Amino acid sequence: MRHSPAATRATTIAVGAVVALLALAGCAPGSSGGGAAQTGKVSTTLTTKKVTLKIQDETGFPVTSKLAAEFTKQHPNVKFKIVRDSFQNLLANAPRLMASADAPDLIRLATLGSNVKDGLLTNLDPYFDAYGWNKFSAGQLAPARMTKAGVRGEGSLWQFGIGYSVTGIYMNQKLADKVGITAVPQTLDELEADLQKAKDAGVLPVQTGMQDGVGTFTLQALINQYGDKQKLIDWMFNKPGATFDTPAVVKGATVFQDWAKKGYLPPDVNAINYTTMVANFSAGQGLFMWDGNWDAANVQKALGKDGAQFFLAPPVKKGDKYVAMGTGNTFAVPAKSTHHDTTLYFLNWIATNAKARQIVVDVTGASPGGDPAQKLPSVEKGSLIEKALELSATVGKDDGFTDFIANTTSGIYQGALQPDEQLLLTDKMTPADFAKAIQAFYLKDLAGS
């Protein structure tokens, strides 16, 4: 996921409940897991020696650069070398990078996959104890945990989130006014009615793309509304017996396919990638765009302060609880890092230092996480970032957060979701076959891990 610089801030958000975002798929912290544990005594005292930390990050994720600059400003002896690549390349190459003799000290790692079993990651349990991360919400860290059996959500801690996201729907206000939409939809039926209004008025209803699988945001948002989110979470966390082949998935895939057939999606949807999707929407092409808080500043800059709204994917019935994707933008410390203590000091600083927390909010529009009792950063009143934080609080209050299905196994995003959704949207695969195909790949991927 990608993030962009935010607008200026002016007021402090009085939504202490925003930290409820951290109640993601809550499981209690564990202390046992597989993989390569960080052995020996750890230190929470920053070194006085000159150190250069190497960060392997994704393209278009500037928050690490901003944080590194501020950290060096406060601690001149620590400098950073940041290497970037596309999200897809990082996903594919992370194991090789972590196993190399020149392994990074910190790497963007969206999914744990087999990296724990293969001994490529540092077990963060000793730092959890040393830094007192038991003050953090258990749900905040749950998706970053894994057991020896490969079940996520429990066991040892292997990742650390830099900002906690929430996904929703952006609406172009100018186009909404044009087609006669006076309020954001409160149910899926109302949403579908708005899509048809846009189509009838000659306005593209949904801006999205499937070249790189970004349309998965839209698909999962639909699936989330049609079934028990815990069943989907159990599947994403690799719990034995969990399956993707459920009525909720088939229903969500059916609606998504129907939207393509009705012309609600771009005619060249399979040729549009994430960057193009955001650029198109920012240029006024599309009434709605399913995306995350990390693009709030981009959208506001392009369409103006009052030019867009950001709202949660609506439930089936008005008044039902909200369900939305949201998780930490997770990083891991490779076992081969030569600066474990310094890297973990940096990570703890991100969650606890006031300036660092402000940078996370300013650059990503995401909750900074950490101790819920800590003061929240300030944001611009009336901005989309302010709205995103409010939405995080709403979903957290409803205990409605789920992880992203693309994070389920190391290969599922590129190996199954992306290509099979392309087939789904071009009517070359039925929704029922889609659900079965994803489940089959999932089982094969887990067996290979």
Image (cartoon, grey):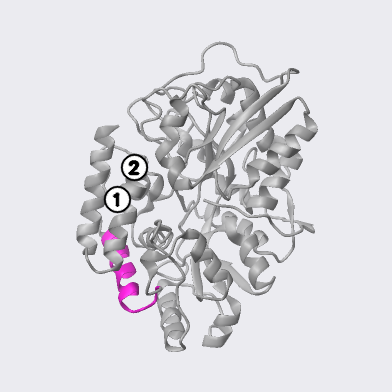
Q: What SS does tag 2 mark?
A: loop
Residue type at mark 2 is: Gly
Residue type at mark 1 is: Ala
Viewer-nearest residue: 144 or 390:
144
Q: Is residue 142 above or below residue 252?
A: above
Residue 233 is marked as none
Q: Is residue 324 visible?
A: yes
- Counting residues from the N terminus, which is met first, the one under dot 2 or under dot 1? 2
Q: Residue 47: x, y in percent?
A: 72, 18
Please name the residue that numbered disc 2 is placed on: 411
Q: Quadrant of the rendered structure where residue 341 is? A: top right
Please name the residue that numbered disc 1 is placed on: 416
Q: Residue 291: x, y in percent?
A: 51, 61
Q: Residue 78: x, y in percent?
A: 72, 27
* 78 displayed left or right of 261: right
**What separation in Å lies between label 2 and label 1 (alpha carbons)?**
8 Å
Q: Residue at x 49, y 65 (%)?
A: 277
Q: Residue 372: x, y in percent?
A: 65, 41
* 66 displayed left or right of 76: left
Q: Is residue 363 above or below residue 120?
A: below
Task: Specify the segment rendered in magenta.
Answer: 248-265
Q: Quadrant of the C terminus?
A: top left
Q: Residue furthest top?
A: 40
Mark 1 surroundings within 10 Å by alpha-carbon count, few (fewer than 14), some (14 through 19), many (20 or more): many
Q: Is residue 405 above or below residue 106?
A: below
